[in-house]
């Protein structure tokens, strides 16, 4: 095989699919079933990070989000499966005068710098501003069920959402249809870099791929002490829940501080999420975590007090140093690459990350912004 991809989450499957589409002979290995780990816990909210905190990750993430409609269209075509994607927009409740000032500046910058807001396939024509700040009256008219507070809201009309379980199922199907050889329930045991090339022990078998791409997130440091140093990825626990209502009561993604609500057309609302960096690999739900989410959801949208709790869960977001991803070659292990640690933007970064890894592994030009994320543990702390 040309390339051995380790880890079958959204990053591993996207990379394997894109590499195979570009002519590579690809094998995808996962220690369990495809799409069952951290990716499955994501809520699928897709919004750009603040324009007031620009940087390489912000720029790459933004480009990735802009490309999402085309990414979904290609995926649906290749997988021959539906993936629900909707550009609903995000309404963020403004809590302070300072946040109001920043929100106005950010909206002005977004309207000047972002591409024009146009209609997307399957979406109604949109004449709204790319981003805008609404006063309390206008906010209440837009979302009557929301307690919008006293300062109004910022509305990002470019924000969207994707049905994560459908996304993961389609990626698995697209990989297989593109010719990716899929091996599930195969745990990576060892990688050796020898004079003759790479030797990989995985699931009881030995392989000699041309290159290895590590997308296994939290599992990468467990492979060896060397990889724990070269790719120091750690888990950050996040709890979430799913509420069910008899009818849709909100139409936008709603963000209120650390709590956000992601509505779907059938009246269900995803509620996220806690951020627990000291939880280690514990994926249990806690009374404190669920109380935080339910209280935040009800405070944001009082009618949710009568909603039914359909399910609760917790996931472990992989994060690299300083909450930055690691993408690119491992200089100390020739032929080994990593694409992991995307923390809270993994689903949104999938289109861009897949393209970047195609560029790296197939010796194409890589954008300058991506060079920031080449693993350099000694320099990055």
Image (cartoon, helix red, strand yellow):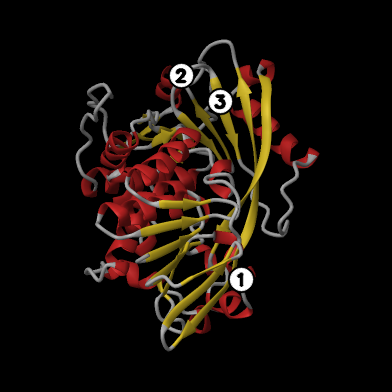
Q: Which tag, 1 or 2, sits closer to the chain's start?
A: 1
Judging by the rendered image, the residue that carries numbered circle 3 is: 269
The residue under the point 54% across, 54% down is 30
Above or below residue 182? Residue 148 is above
Q: What kind of element bears circle 1?
A: loop
Q: Which residue is mark 2?
A: 265
Real-space Cα distance between discs 3 and 2? 9 Å
Extreme residue toward the front, this view:
205
Q: Is residue 135 left or right of residue 344?
A: left
Nearer the observer: mark 3 or 1; the answer is 1
Tell me residue 23's x, y (percent): 25, 57
- Frontmost of labels 1 and 2 is 1
Residue ID for mark 1 = 223
Q: Label 1: few (<14), some or many (≥20) within 10 Å? A: some
Quarter where residue 364 is shown: bottom left
**Residue 130 position (above or below residue 192):** above
Of mark 3 and mark 1, the one earlier in the sequence is 1
Q: CA distance from mark 1 to mark 2?
A: 42 Å
Q: Is residue 305 left or right of residue 113?
A: right
Name the secondary structure under disc 3: strand
- Left or right for 224, reference 379: right
Residue extending furthest toward the bottom = 195
Quarter of the figure that contains the C terminus: bottom right
Q: Can residue 55 be seen in the rendering of this structure?
A: no
> Is residue 181 visible from the viewing direction of this image?
yes
For numbered disc 2, what is the local secondary structure?
loop
- Residue 134 is situated, as x and y percent measured from the top left of the image, at 38, 30
Q: Are dots 3 and 1 in contact, CB under 8 Å?
A: no
The percent coordinates of residue 95 (x first, y second) are: 54, 39
Mark 3 vs mark 1, CA separation in Å = 38 Å
Q: Residue furthest right?
A: 287
């Amino acid at each position: 095989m040309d390339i051995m991809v380790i880890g079958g989450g959204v990053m591993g499957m996207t990379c394997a699919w894109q590499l195979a589409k570009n002519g590579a002979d690809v094998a995808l290995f996962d220690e369990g079933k495809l799409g069952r780990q951290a990716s499955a816990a994501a809520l699928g909210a897709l919004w750009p990070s603040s324009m007031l905190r620009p940087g390489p990750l912000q720029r790459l993430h933004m480009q990735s989000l802009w490309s999402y409609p085309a990414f979904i269209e290609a995926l649906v075509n290749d997988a021959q499966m539906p993936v629900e994607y909707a550009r609903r927009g995000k309404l963020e409740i403004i809590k302070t005068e300072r946040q109001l000032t920043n929100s106005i500046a950010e909206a002005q910058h977004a309207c000047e710098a972002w591409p024009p807001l146009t209609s997307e396939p399957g979406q109604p024509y949109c004449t709204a501003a790319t981003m805008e700040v609404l006063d309390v009256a206008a906010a209440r008219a837009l979302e009557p069920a929301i307690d919008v507070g006293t300062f109004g809201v910022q509305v990002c009309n470019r924000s969207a959402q994707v049905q994560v379980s459908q996304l993961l199922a389609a990626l698995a199907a697209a990989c297989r249809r593109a010719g990716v050889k899929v091996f599930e329930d195969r745990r990576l045991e060892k990688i050796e870099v020898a004079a003759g090339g790479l030797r990989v022990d995985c699931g009881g078998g030995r392989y000699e791929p041309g290159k290895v791409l590590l997308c296994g997130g939290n599992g990468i440091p467990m492979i060896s002490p060397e990889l724990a140093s070269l790719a120091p990825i750690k888990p950050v626990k996040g709890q979430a829940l799913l509420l069910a209502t008899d009818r849709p009561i909100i139409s936008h993604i709603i963000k209120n501080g650390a709590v956000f609500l992601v509505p779907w057309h059938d009246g269900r609302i995803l509620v996220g999420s806690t951020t627990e960096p000291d939880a280690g690999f514990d994926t249990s739900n806690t009374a404190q975590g669920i109380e935080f989410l339910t209280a935040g959801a009800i405070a944001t949208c009082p009618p949710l007090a009568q909603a039914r709790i359909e399910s609760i869960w917790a996931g472990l977001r992989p994060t690299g140093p300083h909450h930055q991803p690691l993408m690119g070659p491992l200089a100390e292990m020739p032929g080994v690459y990593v694409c992991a640690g995307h923390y809270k933007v993994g689903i949104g970064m999938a289109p861009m990350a897949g393209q970047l890894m195609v560029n790296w592994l197939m010796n194409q030009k890589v954008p300058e912004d991506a060079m920031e994320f080449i693993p350099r543990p000694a320099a990055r702390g």
